[in-house]
């Protein structure tokens, strides 16, 4: 079992960017440019490493390898994006790796790319890259190649050594459990569960009971053996259930217009643990968004647009407009879910404005964009 935090440290310490390893300050797959660049690098790493894993580490400064972190990213359907745009797509996983010195909510993203042994290429156009393009890694750069396309194994021994040095042990696991419960979450109710005598899951959060059901908020869930953060949210609520073989979370989101809000189940995620030291994560979107009359939503949509226009021009908001701003992320999301497709672009454009003017609304906007992304990938 590989300790992913050790793996990231080994990659950063012993290797500059090369044909099996890339690092990024951040990625943005919500926009065409960011999506295109991400797919290019995934394609190049898969073709340059047909017989072993390759990696993208996200949240690291390029110049000095300083670990600065990125927001928690839990889109389990990112494989769908790769499948949609790449022929002979590799298997990829995106994992959130906690580091003790990072602020709450920040992690290092680790993308693992596993080739299927065939030449990977773009299936269709994306940003400035054309369908049919094939990319390979040359040193630290992903470049197109149009001749002598042959997959050659150069890195299997090196990658195997790096992964071997990142193996987990009992001491790391015990230290991880103690740190999770006693240090990082000493102000929250914390629990742990051992599965199959080898997997340790820890979770923490504020709890409340409603009609016999326990709900968690400010939730943090980690697979300690691999130092992987499975779930993190300061806004939404989840329920947690488990058996001897599996651990299941159901996430709820709060939506509505004005003060008329309610909780809607969003996604159910189950981790099934096996006796052979493997586990499988299955996610199911169970979201049934609220529906409203479109005519009633036009007023809300236009109000949001006006608020952003005022903020962009530096015009102070009135008291009533400041109240409307608090609901902007959720109401834009509701508009999108009710057919206002241009609301997504409005939300993306609002990010830099709200980051400067209202951090609380900015954080809620990121949560709304996360829900939107999940819905899009599943449809």
Image (cartoon, rainbow, N blue to C red):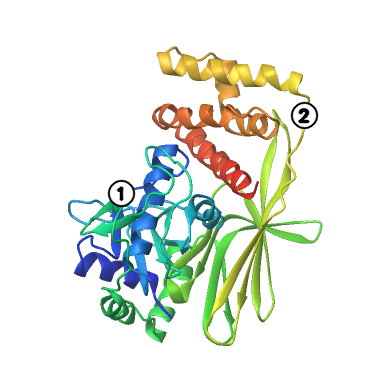
Image-based side of 323 in relation to 259, left or right: left
Q: Position of residue 108 (x, y in %)?
A: 37, 58
Quarter of the image for residue 147 reads bottom left
Residue at 45 percent across and 35 percent down: it is: 359
Q: Tell me where residue 26 appears, x and y as whole percent.
A: 35, 47
Q: Residue furthest right?
A: 211
Question: Residue 54: image x %, image y %?
Answer: 35, 66
Side (left or right) of 204 relative to 32: right
Residue bearing the label numbered 2: 292
Q: Position of residue 260 (x, y in %)?
A: 75, 32
Looking at the picture, does residue 203 appear above or below residue 277? Answer: above
Residue holding disc 1? 25
Q: Is residue 286 left or right of residue 110?
A: right
Say which element carries label 2.
loop
Local crowd at mark 1 within 10 Å, few (<14), some, or many (≥20)?
some
Q: Against 299, is 219 above or below?
A: below
* Mark 2 Cα shell of 10 Å, populated few (<14), some (14-19), many (≥20): some
Which of marks 2 and 1 precedes in the sequence?
1
Looking at the figure, which quarter contains the N terminus? bottom left
For the view shown, which residue lies furthest in the front direction? 147
Report if the CB atoms under discs 1 and 2 are less than 8 Å apart.
Answer: no
Question: Does residue 44 show up?
Answer: yes
Spatial CA distance of label 1 from label 2 is 40 Å
């Amino acid at each position: 079992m590989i300790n992913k935090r050790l793996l990231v440290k080994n990659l950063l310490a012993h290797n500059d960017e090369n044909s099996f390893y890339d690092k990024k300050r951040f990625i943005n797959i919500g926009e065409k440019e960011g999506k295109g660049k991400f797919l290019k690098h995934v394609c190049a790493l898969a073709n340059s490493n047909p017989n072993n894993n390759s990696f993208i580490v996200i949240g690291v400064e390029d110049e000095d390898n300083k670990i600065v972190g990125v927001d928690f990213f839990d889109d389990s359907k990112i494989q769908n994006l790769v499948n949609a745009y790449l022929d002979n797509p590799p298997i990829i996983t995106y994992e959130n790796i906690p580091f003790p010195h990072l602020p709450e909510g920040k992690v290092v993203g680790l993308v693992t790319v596993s080739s299927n042994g065939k030449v990977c290429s773009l299936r269709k156009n994306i940003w400035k890259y054309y369908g049919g393009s094939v990319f390979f890694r040359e040193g630290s750069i992903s470049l197109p190649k149009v001749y002598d396309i042959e997959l050659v194994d150069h890195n299997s021994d090196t990658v195997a050594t790096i992964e071997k040095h990142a193996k987990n042990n009992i001491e790391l696991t015990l230290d991880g459990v103690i740190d999770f419960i006693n240090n990082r979450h000493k102000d929250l109710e914390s629990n742990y569960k051992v599965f199959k005598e080898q997997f340790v899951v820890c979770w923490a959060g504020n709890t409340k009971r409603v009609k016999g059901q326990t709900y968690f908020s400010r939730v943090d869930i980690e697979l300690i053996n691999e130092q992987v953060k499975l779930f993190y949210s300061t806004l939404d609520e989840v329920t947690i259930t488990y058996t001897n073989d599996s651990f299941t979370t159901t996430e709820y989101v709060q939506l509505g217009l004005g003060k008329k809000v309610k909780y809607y189940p969003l996604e159910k995620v189950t981790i099934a643990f096996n006796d052979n030291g493997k586990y499988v994560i299955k996610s199911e979107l169970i979201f049934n968004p609220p529906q409203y009359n479109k005519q009633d939503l036009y007023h809300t949509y236009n109000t949001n647009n006006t608020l952003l226009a005022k903020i962009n021009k530096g015009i102070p908001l009135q008291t009533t407009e400041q109240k409307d701003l608090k609901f902007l992320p959720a109401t834009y999301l509701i508009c999108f879910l009710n057919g206002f497709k241009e609301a997504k672009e409005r939300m993306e454009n609002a990010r830099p404005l709200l980051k400067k003017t209202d951090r609380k609304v900015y954080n809620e906007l990121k949560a709304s964009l996360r829900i939107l992304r999940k819905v899009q990938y599943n449809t």
